[in-house]
Amino acid sequence: MKRPSFNQGLTQLYWLFGFVFCFFCSSSILVAAKPAVRGTGKGEQVGQFLQQVGVHYSEKEGLPSNDVYSLAVDKTIYAGTSNGIARFDGSGWATILKTESPVVALAASGDKVYYATKQKIGQIGPNSTEKSIATLREGVEITEILLTPQGLFIGSNEGLYLLPGESSEQTEVSAVNKLLSEGTEIRQLAYSETAGLAIASSSGLILYSPTEQKAHRVHAETGAGGWFLHDVRAVGFTSDNRLCFAKPQGVGFETEEGWKLLTGSEGLPYNDFTALAVGPQDDVWYATHIGAVHRYDDIWEYRQGRRWLMDDDIRDVVVNKAGEAWFATGKGVSRIELRPMTLREKADFFDAEIDMYHKRTEYGYVDTVRMPEPGVKTVDNQKHDSDNDGLWTSMYGAAESFAYAATKSPEAKKRANDAFRAIGFLSEVPQGGEHSPPHGFPARTILPIDGRNPNEHDSVEHDIKRRERDPDHLWKVLDPRWPVSADGKWYWKTDTSSDELDGHYFFYGAYYDHVAETEEEKAYCRKVVDRVTTHLIENDYALVDHDGKPTRWGQFGPHVINTDEMTDLRGLNAISLLSYLLTAHHVTGDPKFREHYEKLLYEHHYFTNVLHPKFQIGPASGNQSDDEMAFMCYYNLFQYETDPKLIKQYTRSMNRYFLLEQYELCPLFNFIYALNYYSTRFYWPEKIHEGVVPEAVDSLKRYPLDRFNWGIKNSHRLDMVHVGRHVIRFDNRGYRNNGFALPIDERFVEHWNHDPFRMDTGGNGTELADGASYLLPYYMGLYHGYIIEGPESEGAKAGGSAEE
């Protein structure tokens, strides 16, 4: 970030003094500005948009072979494979011709399909009648064909040929070939009625006029000098008959002002091109040896990995009239479908998915599940526990609480009630058994006693090895780590962390405020909150396990965070504990919680502690889990605090945090920050841009429907800046050259504790993540008025998952 200029500094002082003056004139200004109700702030109108969805076809769907070389588009899509040609019928493929050699090129017009193997040209007519048109001489290998009014142009490794009309006699296009050096390979052909025939070749870019039978080299000149065009991989024409091309140096567009040349510095993700296709709105899809690149309205998208493609090495690409891109790969055909959708419809989709696949035990704990076959969903999946079942289920429950607040849906209320019962049970199940912790201690999660015995893995020996491996001398050795409940039905997991509590309290407040309508619901909520919070107060602000000692990560007291024991967590754990106590006071009304809250603030320096909320050394540094935890706590602090002095301090704290988070494009963090925007702008008038709400909405639009953990690769990209060695775990981490993390549809997000700067992630498509990380920011944004849904279309580009 640039150092503010002198004038900028004066501007900031002006804002600061103006705010101080207003503050003293009206001590209620921050309270009045506190957006704790619906509709505060500037919302984004969101109608229907085009959701990108990867759809894949193989021999199972009727292709003659998975080894696909070429595609053509007319009224439908045709695919040329290693042993035949198939036509798409709307849902699958029908073989229309069997061949003995790979079909390297296709062209289609009306009822006729022209095809080429390496040396033979053929035609398929109505009723799949086939005839051979021409055979090229030995040594000439066909690379491309294109049907034009003048006939069928044939590109090869020895130049350009033409089959005029219905003739079977090919003629050499000498005007072009004399410009090509020996051994030149023609890569792609494109035709415009006004501009003529464009030839992308290893020798350069040629433009040929069939009527004049003249050709010339294209020079991409700019005011800065331009490019020498050789090794041109792909070419096309826009709707206004302007050239576009791709070569390893970058991509070029012909404009009214001249050539526009773009490289990785301008956002091009990758440059090892194989073909391009221009869409109906002049968006361009580029096929490469590692994924597909899409450009529209100066926006770049990168589609890589099994979420989008059967294989990354793309041999051909076409775009149909609907703007959908189709890709030929060695493992089948992939299509990026453009599915009209609203944000609410996407939320309904994920709610149904969670109900169908993700709920574990009779209490319905929500988390990722393992499928028996990659990319195939079934109710017969493997549901497993995680250390953070309480956290993930709480965030799901909070999402459903906001859903009920925004929509009054009975289904949302039932889901929220069920989730709260699951979280409440976690502070009940540990009590009364052989290994019972102090009253109010919440378990991490539970497992049924009739399943596997988790202590066989999570044993004393395992704890000792982990302590030595990490190394972590504070790691606890617990025996047992999974005690049995008093009724003998459950194993419950010990050593509960602050992650869990941050999620629990976030849910406690949302549930109490928006869902608990009957006295029975409110009383149960108060009971749960009281016992957990009282446990903290009675145990020196710590979670104390069945061994009588604090858990590894559940310590919040001043004797710990204000000393050298847990210094790095001083700011975050102060924010956490303060939010717990403030939420407890709000829910229960018990003044003891407010008393402890203020004691920590003013007697133990938590008022100052919150100003350093995260241990970090700049963007892309620090523990990403801390971010998710902190912003849930900020939300409750701003919802329930009314003292202007404290709101001001929390504002300082959150703004310092958001200076880091603004680059991560996380809709949850953005909406929580936006709730306090109108007060934060007085302190940081120029440092945090106003795009936080539009960027949050854009991320929700881009959020993929495919939640399988497919591997993703981005470290090879040209537009990435790799994080320096000053950051711990710097390898495999980076951000785009615009300073922002990758968009959400170019990475895999399981939960919002993920590292958005990690470039490459593994995965084989057997793990299906739930959609709660979409539901929470969506319903929160809807409830608070930052998402305004309406029937009007957003005018999404035919090629885009979202628009700006």
Image: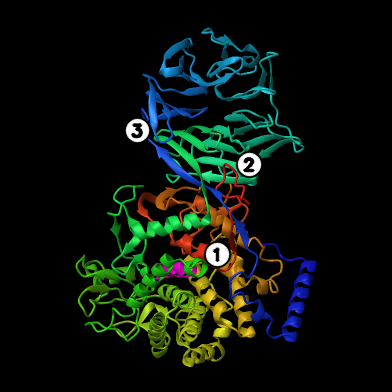
The three-letter code of the residue at mark 1 reads: Leu
Instruction: Kindly identify the residue that appears in the image at 69 percent across and 26 percent down.
Output: 218
Q: Nearer the viewer, mark 1 or mark 3?
A: 1
Q: Which residues are magenta?
A: 390-402
Query: Overall secondary structure of the magenta stretch?
Result: helix
Image coordinates for residue 353, horizontal then vertical, percent? 38, 56
- Asked if 268 appears above or below 761 in the picture, the reply is above
The three-letter code of the residue at mark 2 reads: Thr
- Label 2, secondary structure: give it: loop
Image coordinates for residue 346, horizontal then vertical, percent? 48, 55
- Label 3, secondary structure: give it: helix
Q: Which residue, given by chain and number where applicable, does mark 2 sit on?
A: 263
Task: Say if residue 241 shows up in the picture.
Answer: yes
Graded by Cα atoms within 10 Å as few (under 14), some (14 to 19) or many (20 or more), the crowding at tag 1 reads many
The three-letter code of the residue at mark 3 reads: Glu
Q: Earlier in the sequence, mark 1 or mark 2?
A: 2
Q: Earlier in the sequence, mark 2 or mark 3?
A: 3
Query: How far is the residue under mark 2 from the one under mark 3?
Result: 37 Å
- Asked if 729 appears above or below 512 in the picture, the reply is above
Mark 1 and mark 2 residues within 8 Å of each other at the beta carbon? no
- Asked if 406 appears above or below 588 in the picture, the reply is above
Q: Which residue, given by chain and number where applicable, does mark 1 sit on?
A: 782
In this picture, residue 569 sits left or right of residue 454: right
Instruction: Kindly identify the residue that appears in the image at 71 percent across and 65 percent down.
Output: 3
Q: How many marks?
A: 3
Q: Which residue, given by chain and number where applicable, does mark 3 sit on?
A: 59
Q: Quadrant of residue 332?
A: top left
